[in-house]
């Protein structure tokens, strides 16, 4: 299964030191060049540069460029790369970008969905501590969605 990753979910997974989940669930995931550039210019994750550098083999240039109104270059390239390669999933958290992607019938998954899959595959024992860590690291996810996944796994809600 091929997954194309946007910036925000990679940052979130780096901040909770769970980037390997992405590699375990989707060994063939790709990062568009614009996303890679955004990641390497993001101050919040400088301390994770070693883990970030390990993802460099996943970076892919895209051949088709055109802007999508209202979203950033990284999100646009992620959508374009998904379409170019006929990928299986687009890993994206931004609501506006996700809505644009879904107009192209793109199969989207977010950070919380990836963590939920990891829990289902026994790659993580519990979601709640990870969700709390995301909140502690100032990663903002709707409490509604956090509790939806916690309810599905039978864990205490936030």
Image (cartoon, grey):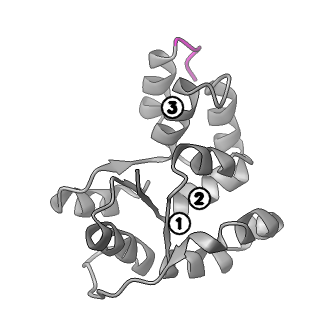
Label 1 CA crowd tier, 10 Å (few <14, some 14–19, many 20+) = many
Residue 31 appears left or right of 55 = left
Precedes in sequence: disc 3 or disc 1: 1
Is residue 44 in view?
no
Spot occupied by residue 106 in the image (x, y as percentages of width and height): 25, 56
Rounded to the nearest angstrom, the CA distance separating label 2 from label 3 is 15 Å
Image point (35%, 55%), residue name: 95
User: How would you classify the magenta stretch by its main secondary structure?
Assistant: loop
Q: Which residues fall within the magenta stretch? A: 154-158
Q: Quadrant of residue 4?
A: bottom left
Judging depth in this view, the residue of 123 and 157 nearest the camera is 123
Is residue 118 in view?
yes
Judging depth in this view, the residue of 4 and 130 nearest the camera is 4
* Marking on residue 10: 2
* Residues at marks 1 and 2 touching, judged by CB atoms closer than 8 Å: yes
The residue that mark 1 highlights is: 7
The question of residue 37 being in magenta is answered with no
Precedes in sequence: disc 2 or disc 3: 2
Judging depth in this view, the residue of 1 and 72 nearest the camera is 1
Judging depth in this view, the residue of 156 and 59 nearest the camera is 59
Image point (81%, 67%), residue name: 50
């Amino acid at each position: 299964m091929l997954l194309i990753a946007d910036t925000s979910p990679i940052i979130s997974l780096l901040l909770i030191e769970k980037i390997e989940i992405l590699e375990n669930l989707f060994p063939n995931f790709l990062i568009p060049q614009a996303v890679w550039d955004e990641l390497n210019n993001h101050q919040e994750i400088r301390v994770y540069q070693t883990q970030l550098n390990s993802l460099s083999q996943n970076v892919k240039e895209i051949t088709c460029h055109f802007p999508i109104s209202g979203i950033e270059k990284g999100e646009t390239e992620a959508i374009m790369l998904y379409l170019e390669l006929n990928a299986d999933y687009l890993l994206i958290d931004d609501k506006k970008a996700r809505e644009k992607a879904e107009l192209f019938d793109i199969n989207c998954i977010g950070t919380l969905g990836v963590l939920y899959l990891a829990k289902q595959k026994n790659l993580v024992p519990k979601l709640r501590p990870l969700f709390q860590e995301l909140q502690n690291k100032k990663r903002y996810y709707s409490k509604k969605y956090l509790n939806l996944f916690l309810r599905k796994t039978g864990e205490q809600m936030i």
